[in-house]
Image (cartoon, rainbow, N blue to C red):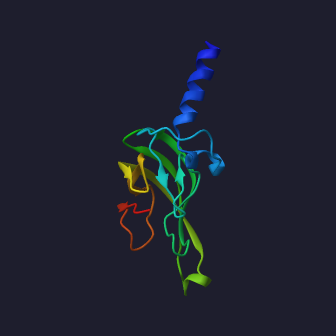
């Protein structure tokens, strides 16, 4: 049984894109695979179950932190965490980051144009479990264009 589990783990590792491995360390040549699905970050790196995710790539004034992934499937992924948002008062450089508890859902997997053999989530939904940062709605979805 142990041999079977080790073999299955080795086979799984071989089909995950090199950029999705922790630290981005390349492994054996990537085998075309539609599974698992990744989320692409601001630096065009494929990630799976990231602990943090920047939403505001231009200035970093909005980021998800302490993400705890409940599921990571071929159609959706869900996590709970905290949305850290700079209030930019009186301006962003002098603003304070405020914490908002949030449930995150990634969905709508599609082929990643830069790597057509890799599926990436293209929609992120944020459901604020307490208050939402003004003027954002308590339930909002964004397209991930990275």
Residue in view at x 53 percent, y 41 percent: 30
Residue 144 visible within the image: yes
Query: On the rendered image, what quadrant is the C terminus found in?
Result: bottom left
Q: Quadrant of residue 33?
A: top left
Residue in front for this viewpoint, 116 or 91: 116
Residue at 42% in and 73% down: 134
Front residue of 107/42: it is 42
Q: How many marks?
A: 0
Can residue 84 be seen here? The reply is no
Q: Residue 96, position in %: x, y?
A: 60, 76
Q: Is residue 130 above or below residue 96?
A: above
Q: Nearer the viewer, residue 73 or 104?
A: 73
Instruction: Say if 39 sits above or below 1 in the image.
Output: below
In this view, the residue farthest toward the bottom is: 90
| x and y percentages locating residue 14 in the rendered image | 56, 34
Foreground residue among 17 and 76: 17
The outermost residue toward the front is: 29
| Rendering coords of residue 15 (x, y %) | 51, 36
Q: Quadrant of the N terminus?
A: top right
User: Which x, y percent locates residue 44?
Assistant: 51, 60
């Amino acid at each position: 049984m142990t041999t079977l589990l080790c073999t299955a783990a080795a086979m799984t590792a071989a089909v995950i894109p090199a950029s999705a491995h922790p630290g981005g360390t390349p492994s054996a040549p990537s085998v075309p695979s539609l599974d698992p699905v990744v989320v692409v970050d601001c630096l065009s790196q494929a990630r799976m179950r990231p602990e943090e995710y920047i939403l505001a790539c231009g200035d970093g004034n909005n980021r998800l932190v302490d993400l705890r992934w409940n599921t990571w499937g071929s159609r959706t992924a869900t996590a709970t965490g905290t949305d850290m948002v700079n209030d930019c008062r009186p301006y962003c450089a002098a603003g304070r980051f405020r914490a908002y508890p949030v449930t995150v859902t990634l969905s709508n997997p599609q082929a990643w144009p830069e790597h057509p053999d890799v599926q990436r989530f293209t929609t992120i939904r944020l459901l604020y479990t307490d208050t939402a940062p003004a003027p954002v709605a308590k339930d909002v979805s964004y397209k991930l264009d990275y």
